[in-house]
Image (cartoon, rainbow, N blue to C red):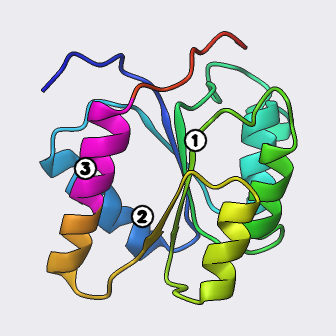
Amino acid sequence: MTIQQITPLLIAEDSDEDFEVLQLLMQQMEIQNPIYRCTNGDKVLDFLYQEGDYSNPDIAPRPSIILLDLNLPGTDGRDVLEQLKQDQRLKEIPVVIFTTSSNPKDVEFCYQKGANGYLIKPVDSEELEKTVQAFVEFWLEVNTPPPNEHN
C-alpha cells in the first residue's frame, strides 16, 4: 500500500443501516480517512459550502471524495451532483454514485452530469464487501485526488 495523504471522505447516505455497514467494512479495511456523513442532499450542500450547521471548516473540511446516494430526501443526489459539477470551486472533487438504482437512465444521467464513478449497492453482503473493497482500493489508496487548494 502506498503512503497516501489522509483526506476526508464524505458519504451522503440517508439509510442508517447502509451507513453502518459501510462504516464497519471500512473499519475492517483499516481505513484511516476521516468519514463524514450527511443524511440528505441539503446537508451535503451545506457541508460543501460550509453553511448552516457546517459553517466551521473544522466540522466540514473539504472532502477528497464524495460517495453519493441518488435517492436522498429533500434535494436528491441527482440535483446535488448537477450543482457540484457546475461549481468551479467544487467540480474537481470526485463524486462516486453509490445507489441501489441500476436504471440505465440514472447511470447515463450521472455520467453526463460529471459523476466519476457509479456503483450499484449489492443486496448480498459478500458482494457489498467486494464493491466497498474495490472503491476503497481505487479511490482511497491508488487514485491521486486533485490538490486541496481551496481551503
Callout 1 touching callout 3 (CB < 8 Å): no
Q: Position of residue 125 (x, y in %)?
A: 20, 80
Give the vertical position of 8 relative to 71 (above or below). Answer: above
Image quarter for residue 113? bottom right
Question: Which secondary structure, mark 1?
Answer: loop
Q: Position of residue 19 (x, y in %)?
A: 42, 64
Q: Which residue is mark 2?
A: 19
Q: Are marks 2 and 1 in contact (CB under 8 Å)?
A: no
SS assignment at label 2: helix
Which residue is identified by label 1?
A: 94
Residue 105 place in picture, x, y as percent: 69, 85
Q: Which residues make up the magenta segment?
A: 132-143
Position of the N terminus, as image quadrant, is top left
Question: Disc 3 marks which amino acid?
Answer: Met
Residues 75 and 16: in front is 75
The answer to whether marks 2 and 3 mark residues whose Cβ atoms lie closer than 8 Å is: no
Q: Distance between the Cα atoms at labels 2 and 3?
A: 10 Å
Badge 2 crowding class, 10 Å Cα cut-off, few under 14, some 14 to 19, many 20 or more, is: some
Percent from the top left, x then y, of residue 61?
A: 61, 25
Alpha carbon of mark 1 to alpha carbon of mark 3: how far? 19 Å
Q: Is residue 36 left or right of residue 109?
A: left
Asked if the magenta segment contains residue 138, the reply would be: yes
Mark 3 crowd level (few <14, some 14–19, many ≥20, 10 Å Cα): some
| Label 3 secondary element | helix
Amino acid type of the residue tagged 1 in the rendering: Pro
> If you read the primary sequence from the N terminus, does the residue marked by circle 2 or circle 3 appear first?
2
Q: Which residue is mark 3?
A: 26
Q: Which of 13/52 is in front? A: 13
